Image: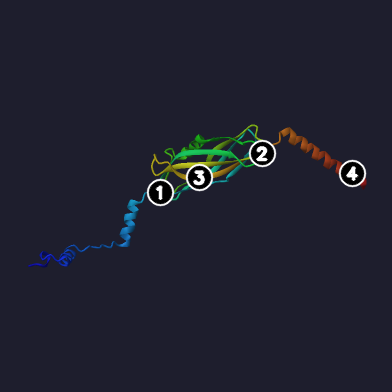
Amino acid sequence: MPRFFNGSSGGLTLLFSRLFRPVVMIAPAASLVALFALVAPAKAQIVVTLTPSFASGAPGSTVTFQATIQNQSTTQGVFLNEFFGDFASLPGDTQDVINTVDEPSFFGYFQAQFPDRRLPANTTYTGNLVDVTIRANAPNGAADAGEIVIRGGLTESERNILADLDFTVTSAVIPEASSVGLLGLGAGAFLGGAVLRRRKAR
């Protein structure tokens, strides 16, 4: 009589272990890397740099920030689908300097070179980024900090954060032409008087 019919639990265990031995398969490391590449979602790879990140202008004027946007991927283009600009007064300021961050101006500048808002692989955009207007009543020397967020991805529908940048705008009153002229006349009169006094002293 076979051992597994004699009521012995040890015999049953021995037979089961022989019939149903686990099979362990070890995949090569290269295969695991390839599998991970298929499962892991692709990500957009861009670097955005403001050049520079600060600007100054007279009250009521508009300043334009410039930037470089580099797509570091060698195979995939990146869609820049959304642009958002925000600003808040720096600690200690009594009035805001920034009046508006003209978000549509970004697409006006960028789409002039890339109409479909797609930055091709291994490509760099260099040029105007966005227009910022300064309040007409901004006090001289006051400053505001702002933030720029660009969203997009590998498709036209993606809204992943691709860049989050800080910038600063300072209000600088530019002297009027008449004031500059008076200052020049005053300086000329002072220098002329000094020269005349030297001649008399001789």
Q: Are marks 2 and 4 in contact (CB under 8 Å)?
A: no
Q: How is the image coloured?
A: rainbow
Is the residue under label 2 in contact with that under label 3 (CB below 8 Å)?
no
Residue sitting at the far front: 7
Q: Amino acid at mark 4?
A: Arg
Q: Give the label, 3 or 4, closer to the camera.
A: 3
Give the residue drawn at x 77%, y 38%.
184
Looking at the rendered structure, the secondary structure element under dot 1 is loop
Residue toward you, 138 or 1:
1
First in residue order: circle 4 vs circle 1: 1
Disc nearer the start of the sequence (3/4): 3
Sequence order check, earlier mark of 2 and 1: 1
| Amino acid of disc 3 | Asp
Label 2 vs label 4, nearer the camera: 2
Front disc: 4 or 1: 1
According to the picture, the residue beneath numbered tag 1 turns out to be: 43
Q: CA distance from mark 2 to mark 4?
A: 38 Å
- Assign the N terminus to one quadrant of the image: bottom left
| Label ID, residue 164 | 3
Kindly identify the residue that appears in the image at 46 percent across and 44 percent down: 161
The mark that comes first in sequence, 3 or 2, is 3
Where on the picture, by quarter, is residue 96? top right
Q: Which residue is mark 2?
A: 172
Q: Where does residue 158 sit, x and y in percent of width and height?
A: 40, 41
Amino acid at pointer 1: Lys
Q: Is residue 100 left or right of residue 114?
A: right
- The residue carrying pointer 2 sits among few (fewer than 14), some (14 to 19) or many (20 or more) residues within 10 Å by Cα, namely some
